[in-house]
Amino acid sequence: MASQFNFEIAKELPNGLGRAGLIRTPHGDIETPAFAVVGTHATVKYLTPDEVRSTGATVMLSNGYHLYRKAAEIDAAGGLAEYSGWRGPTMTDSGGFQVMSLGSGIGKVVSMDKRDIAREQAKSAKKDRLSQVSDSGVSFRHPTDGKIETFTPEVSMQIQHQIGADIMMAFDELTSIGDSYEYNVAALRRTHAWARRCLKGHQKLTAARADKPYQALYGVLQGAHYKSLRRRTAGYLGRLDFDGYGLGGAFEKERLGDILQWCNQELPKTKPRHLLGLSKPDDIFVGAENGVDTFDCVAPTREARHGRLYTLDGNINIRNSVFAEDDSPIDAECDCPTCQSGLTRAELRRLLKSPESADKETAFKLASIHNVHFIVNLLKQIRHSILAGNFIKFRDLWLERYYKK
């Protein structure tokens, strides 16, 4: 069947990397740069699909690992968009991060100096993992029932086709910050081999499921913080027939801009790029400036449930006693449904600290709506600034205010 997926660039930044564009999918368009709200289990915790839409979000990302035992059920329901009730554009990751991080302590972005990295590499060499990686795939013990499972590129493609998201990710090997250069070389070789197997499986399944909406497949780039590996994988995967690219890996936060430049200078300009698992505002600005089109992260909702709320003047922890009598809104300049309802910081704090579970759940809902809207709206403002030609000015003023403390 003909692809129902394409990407158009509306305007580029002078550096030739950052851009505003439009991703067209079978379930709707995504104006980029954009933030994909994370609904790990096909639902955003404590929010209905309508409440997610009220934040301004246009795309939801779900997790292939957490949904793989429900994949057939989701397929029978008509795919992720219908099953979830979201009915807009959807994405899935391959599940590789979850199965490879079991017991390994793998993280995505960290702040470390060279001594810290060397220490982590020494620890990693001695660490026994609950998942075992081989050229064929990854075997792991499921944490809930102890059953030994195996994910391969072919299994990942089968699962993600059944889940039916508009955009899905190739199965890749994510290394940890503690893995050596030599291990990263071997892992990248596996990732390239798995990418070819994913493409082959994807093409076969697309033909077999021609009655289903087209699903775009993104190749995923790894290579940690090594320039030679990042450029190598971008050049190699960029020549394969992927619909777009996922930018992944564990590395020092301070290297994000360099890594994105190394990758995006090599990748084809005409295909979209997704940065996996980051949502800090400074990271978002670095990403947008260096060619990232979409972002995702669980942090906005997870932090909301812990009382950490985003404001234009920096984050606040609503649990702190200083807010007990604070009758101001969460953010006076925010137009999200939570802030527009007239809810005060003190009222939200009382709900969050209430012994009643219903009050807590209400607080989780209200705080999550606010945080998701904040990040979604930030990406919309970044898009507008690119189109208006004043991205650098907007970036500098926004970050100066947010991080002034």
Image (cartoon, grey):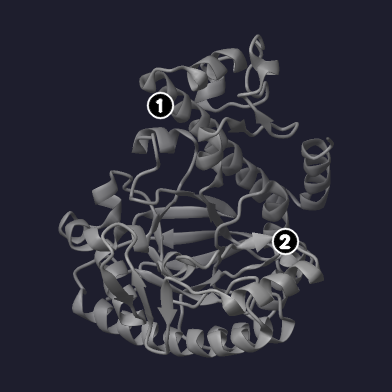
Pick the residue in front: 87 or 60: 60
Q: Return the x and y of residue 40 as percentages of the image width and height.
A: 39, 51
Is 392 placed above or below 105 here?
Answer: above
Q: Which callout, 2 or 1, points at the residue further toward the start of the chain?
A: 2
Which of these two is toward me, 47 or 68? 68
Q: Nearer the viewer, residue 325 or 13?
A: 325
For label 1, count other residues whose C-alpha is less than 10 Å away and answer few (under 14), some (14-19) or many (20+): some
- Up the image or down, 77 lies above or below 235; here it is above
Determine the residue positioned at 73% across, 58% down.
286
Q: Quadrant of the N terminus?
A: bottom left
- Front residue of 309/102: it is 102
Q: Quadrant of residue 223?
A: bottom right
Query: Would you say residue 170 is visible in this rendering?
Result: no
**Residue appearing at x 70%, y 63% in the figure:** 18
Disc 2 to disc 1: CB gap under 8 Å: no
Residue placed farthest to the left in the image? Answer: 76
Residue 228 screen position, x and y as percent: 71, 87
The spot of residue 198 in percent (x, y) is: 38, 82
Look at mark 1 in the image and give the residue it sits on.
361
- In the displayed structure, does residue 385 sit left or right of residue 58? right
The structure residue drawn at horizontal position 25% and vertical position 50%, both measured from the top left corner, is 82
Tell me the distance, in whole angstroms, between the alpha carbons under discs 2 and 1.
33 Å
Amino acid type shown at disc 1: Glu
Left or right: 286, with 65 as reference point: right
Q: Is the residue 84 above or below the residue 67 in the image?
A: above
Q: Is residue 208 visible?
A: yes
Residue type at mark 2 is: Lys
* Residue to which mark 2 is pinned: 253
Q: Residue at x 46, y 71 (%)?
A: 100
